[in-house]
Image (tube, grey):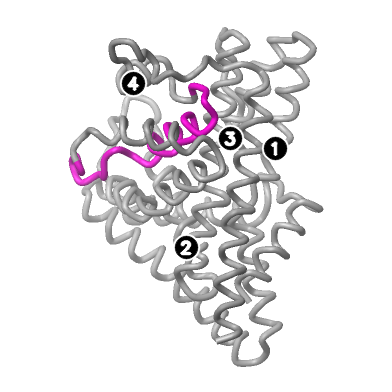
Amino acid sequence: MGWIALVLTLLLEQLRPLPLRNPVYSLAGTVADATHDGMNAGRRRHGMYAWLLLVGGVLVLAGAAYAFALSISWWLALLVNVVVLYFTMGFRQFSHRLTEIQIALANGDLPAARNELAQWKAGADSAPSAVEIDADEIVRQSCEHGLQLAHKHVFGVLFWFVLLPGPLGPVLFRLAEYLARRWNRPANGALPADRFGQFARRAFAWIDWLPARMTALGFAIVGDFEGAVYCWRKVSRPPAAVDGMPQPDSRTVILAAAGGALGSRVLSSAESARFFDEAGLEGGGLSEPAPAMLNTAVGLVWRALLLWLALLLLVSLAGWLA
C-alpha cells in the first residue's frame, strides 16, 4: 500500500501542485504560533515541552485517524495516506520558480532572474530585496535551494513514510522541520532571541540525520559516485556533534554530495574553500556553476526519486510474494 500511495501522490501532485498558501499550512502556522505564545517563558525546557505536546498530539491524531480508516477499509486507509502525503511532500509546487529563472537567464534578463530567486527563497513571505549577483551565482543558489527543497519535501518525507506506519512518518518529519524554522525565526525589534526554539532545532537535526545521508547516497548512486563520495568525505571531517547538533549538518552533506555527483560546485565559494581547497585540487576539482547546471540538477533529483521508488517496489513485491 505504501508504494501505491506514493505513486498516486506524485501523479496527483504533478497534475495539481499544492499552492504555498493553503488552509493546512495556514492552520499549522496558527497552531505553532499559538503554542509558542502560550508556552514560551524564555527557557529552553519550555520549548521542549511545547514541541513534545504539539508533535505528540498531532501524531496521536494522525495515528488514530489511520487506525480508524484501516479498520473500515484498506482503500480508506490508502486515501488517508495519499491525503497526508499530498500535503507533506512534493517538489512540483516550487518548480515554477526554477523554470522562470531558467527562462530569465536564457533571455539574459539578470534582474528578473534575481527577483525570481529572491521570491523563491522567501516562500510564502514577502520577497526580500534581490542582491546584485551574477548569472553563475544565480544558478548556484537556485540549485542549492532546489536541492534542499527536494530533500525536505520529497526524500525526507519518503524515508519516514517507509520507516513508520501510515501517515506518522511524513507528519513527524514535516512538522519537526516546520517547527525548527518557525520557532527559530530572527527576533523582531530590539528583543534578543530566546532559547525556546533550541530543542525544536536540535530535534529536527537528529530526525533528519539519517534521511539526509540517504538523500546524499541516492545522489551519489545516480550521479558521479566517486565525486560524490569524495566530497561527502571531505565535509565529514568536523567532530560528530557540536552543542548537541550532529556534524556535519544535513544541508552540508546533501549539497556536498550533490555537487560531487554533478561535478559542479553547489556549496558557496567560502564553504568550498573551507572543505575542499588543497594543493593541486582547489575546489575539489569541481567546475564552476553554469546555466546548464539547472537542468542537470533537476535530472539528478528525478533519477534519485525513481531509484528509491524502484527499490521500494522491489521490497513491496518481495513482501507480497513471501
Q: Which mark is residue 133?
A: none
Give the spatial CA distance, label 3 vs label 4: 22 Å
Give residue 96's position: percent from left, percent from top: 74, 35
Which percent across, then down, holds residue 42? 24, 45
Mark closer to the chain start, 4 or 2: 2
Residue 95, numbered circle: 1
Q: Quick one: label 1, few (<14), some, or many (20+) residues within 10 Å? A: some
- Asked if residue 8 lies left or right of residue 139, the reply is right
Q: Residue at x 63, y 77 (%)?
A: 1
Q: Amino acid at mark 4?
A: Phe
Q: Earlier in the sequence, mark 1 or mark 2?
A: 1
- Badge 4 is on which residue? 276
Q: Residues within 10 Å of mark 2 (few under 14, many from 20)?
A: many
Q: Tag 4's secondary structure?
A: helix
* Residue at screen point 45% across, 54% down: 34
Q: Counting residues from the N terminus, which is met first, the one under dot 3 or under dot 1?
A: 1
Density class for disc 3 (Cα within 10 Å; few <14, some 14-19, many ≥20) is many
Can the viewer see residue 228?
Answer: yes
Label 2 sits on residue: 160
**Mark 4 vs mark 2: in front:** 4
Q: Mark 3 or mark 4: which comes first in sequence?
A: 3
